[in-house]
Amino acid sequence: MSEATIHLGSGKVRELYGLDDERLLLVASDRISTFDVVLPTPIPDKGRVLTGLSAFWFARTAEIVANHLIALRDDARSLECRRLEMLPVEMVVRGYLAGSGWKDYTSTGAVCGHMLQAGLREAERLSEPIVTPATKAETGHDLNIDEAEAARICGEARYDAARQAALDLYRFGEAHAAERGIIVADTKFEFGVDAAGVVVLADEALTPDSSRFWPADSYEPGRPQPSFDKQYARDWCEASGWDKTEPGPELPDDVVAGTRARYVEAFERLTQTSFERYLADPAVVLG
Ligand code: Q0Z
């Protein structure tokens, strides 16, 4: 990284830097969050897994929608990106009934304004994916809004372009992952607008941190599903008696190793590339 690199912000597990007027650097750390708390123990290579997966999807979906990727760096954890004017709404696409969507459905029969058929079970696959936009609330938590509100905030044309891209991206990713034994239950996309007014996919794409990945081989609607990547860490945290407030517990070595193995497994299944090969030459995921 050059000396002129300016730190612009921190996410829970990523850092954002300015490179010049046109370019940003997104760096994925090895930090892991569970139950909304960042744990003190890193998962080795987690940031490289997430960066490699994002780069893989950006390369494979460029014909669906333009994206912000300029280059994948040799450290395998950093993406050089185009600077965009971000839309202030996150585009969540849900193909399965989980998390806050399942909660809303049980209390109202609808999810963010989408009235769904009666009698659906927890984790059930929806007949069609739905878009449930969200904004960053004051609390830092996401606030679900309906699509009409999102369109007002973004502008109709920009919202419609982002919505169509999000649905097409989800359908592509879900079908690709399903062939490799991973269910993408839902995922969050962020979009920006470039200087020409084009709506562009930004941030990360179809990673385990921006999505719910479930193992297909144990899928059974009617109960909560295990997370493909975080379940070891979550189970250990639950059993430890931690009250889920800051600070989180240190993870033991076997839980770190098991969690790392699941991230690497997700990477290798989805990209059909050995993780070792990716570390030696990150550009292999760009196809
Ligand atoms: C992404 C974020 C992170 C903290 C701003 N291409 C872009 N153009 C303009 N802005 C962004 C992007 Cl990706 C942008 N974030 C989210 C990421 C750390 C915040 F790694 N904020």
Image (cartoon, helix red, strand yellow):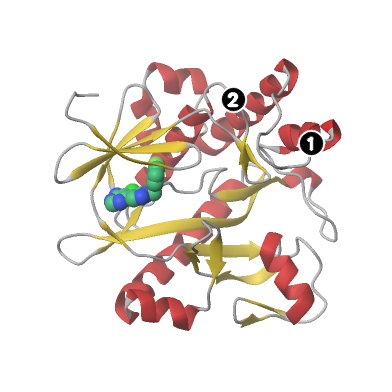
Which tag, 1 or 2, sits closer to the chain's start?
A: 2
Determine the residue positioned at 77% across, 34% down: 237
Q: Is residue 287 visible?
A: no
Q: Residue 242 shows which numbered tag?
A: 1
Q: Amino acid at mark 2?
A: Ile
Residue located beneath label 2 in the image? 43
Q: Position of residue 56 (x, y in %)?
A: 42, 39
Q: Nearer the viewer, residue 245 or 129?
A: 245
Q: Residues within 10 Å of mark 2 (few under 14, many from 20)?
A: many
- Judge from the rendering whether residue 258 lies leftward or rightward of residue 12; answer left or right: right
Q: Nearer the viewer, residue 112 or 71?
A: 112
Q: Nearer the viewer, residue 210 or 165?
A: 210
Q: Amino acid at mark 1?
A: Trp
Q: Element under label 2?
A: loop
Determine the residue positioned at 52% across, 44% down: 207
- Judge from the rendering whether residue 148 lies leftward or rightward of residue 130; answer left or right: left
Q: Residues within 10 Å of mark 1 (few under 14, many from 20)?
A: few
Q: Residue 131 shows which numbered tag?
A: none
Q: Position of residue 3 (x, y in %)?
A: 18, 24
Q: Position of residue 282 (x, y in %)?
A: 37, 25
- Judge from the rendering whether residue 117 lies leftward or rightward of residue 200; answer left or right: right
Q: Is residue 40 visible?
A: yes
Q: Quadrant of the C terminus?
A: top left
Marks 1 and 2 sit apart, C-alpha to C-alpha, by: 19 Å
84 shown above or below 46: below
47 shown above or below 145: above
Determine the residue positioned at 85% across, 34% down: 239
